[in-house]
Image (tube, grey):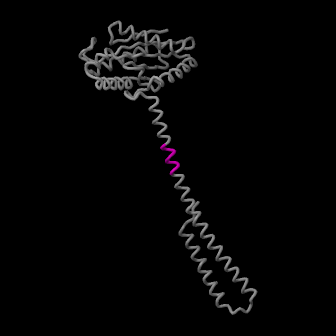
Amino acid sequence: MILNKENDEDIFRKEKEVIKNAEKFVENYDGSNKEIYNRYKNLLKNYKDLLNQIEYIIKISDNYQLDLIKAKDKLQKEIEERKKAEKELKEISTRDQLTGLYNRREFEKIIKKEWRNSIRKATPISIIMIDIDNFKEFNDNYGHLAGDNCLQKVSKIMQNTLKRPRDFVSRYGGEEFVAILPDTDQEGASHVAESIRKNIEKAKIPHKISLVSDFVTVSLGVATTNQADLLVYEELLDEADSALYKAKENGKNRYVSVEI
């Protein structure tokens, strides 16, 4: 704890006045008792030296403590900046840079976690594969910048459609996306898939050369299981992909749902 500087100065000022008066006394002493005189003079000198040492120690101690406080504040700031950088780095490593959705690597991490939860709690789990219809034609006609903008808009719509905290959507590759719906049966997953489809259609993103609509649409494959303990998540993912392929075959802008 740093001493009060004003109190320190007041104490030393008073003590120096005592020393000054004592020195005057020594100067004016008649020397009638040499032994006491010499002892007093030595004590006065020692006290004066000690007072100077204490004053110096307190001064450097205060400065040292101030330096420590400054160093601590600087260290705390550096720690906060490092944590912020780590958080930003983690975000970069788990997010798709174009759409802002989670990336495929993060999908694989989350599906493994939710799969274990499904086994432990004996609850259903669903996967939805989503693909933008005729996206190559969109890029060819409107250009890649417009294509990127389309991907961003579709991604935002999907994020806003998934309401529950654990519902998860990521970019799987190109114009393909994947959603994980924990604790969700086939009926619930189908409802989510249809909501995604409708919301993207309602956005009315122009797609004049689409074979399906004048606007951007998506096809979806839904796969659900109540038996995660008998499967691996890759099997459910394959079923969702197959369902997506059937939705494409059946005319696009629709979903196909299966349960295994």
The x and y percentages for residue 111 are: 50, 20
| Residue 144 position (above or below residue 190) | below
Horizontal relation, residue 185 to residue 194: left or right? right
Q: Is residue 77 magenta?
A: yes
Q: Nearer the viewer, residue 79 or 22?
A: 79
- Estimate the x, y position of residue 114 in percent, counting from the top left: 52, 21
Q: Magenta segment range?
A: 74-81
Q: Quadrant of residue 100?
A: top left
**Above or below, 247 relative to 158:** above
Q: Is residue 111 magenta?
A: no
Which of the 4 quarters of the picture holds residue 36? bottom right
Residue 145, position as x, y percentages in the image: 29, 26
Q: Is residue 46 left or right of residue 68?
A: right
Question: Quarter of the image containing the N terminus?
Answer: bottom right
Q: Is residue 81 left or right of residue 56?
A: left
**Residue 213 falls in image quadrant:** top left
Taking the spot 35% from the left edge, 12% from the top edge, the residue there is 254
Q: Identify the residue shown where x is 63% and y is 71%.
A: 53
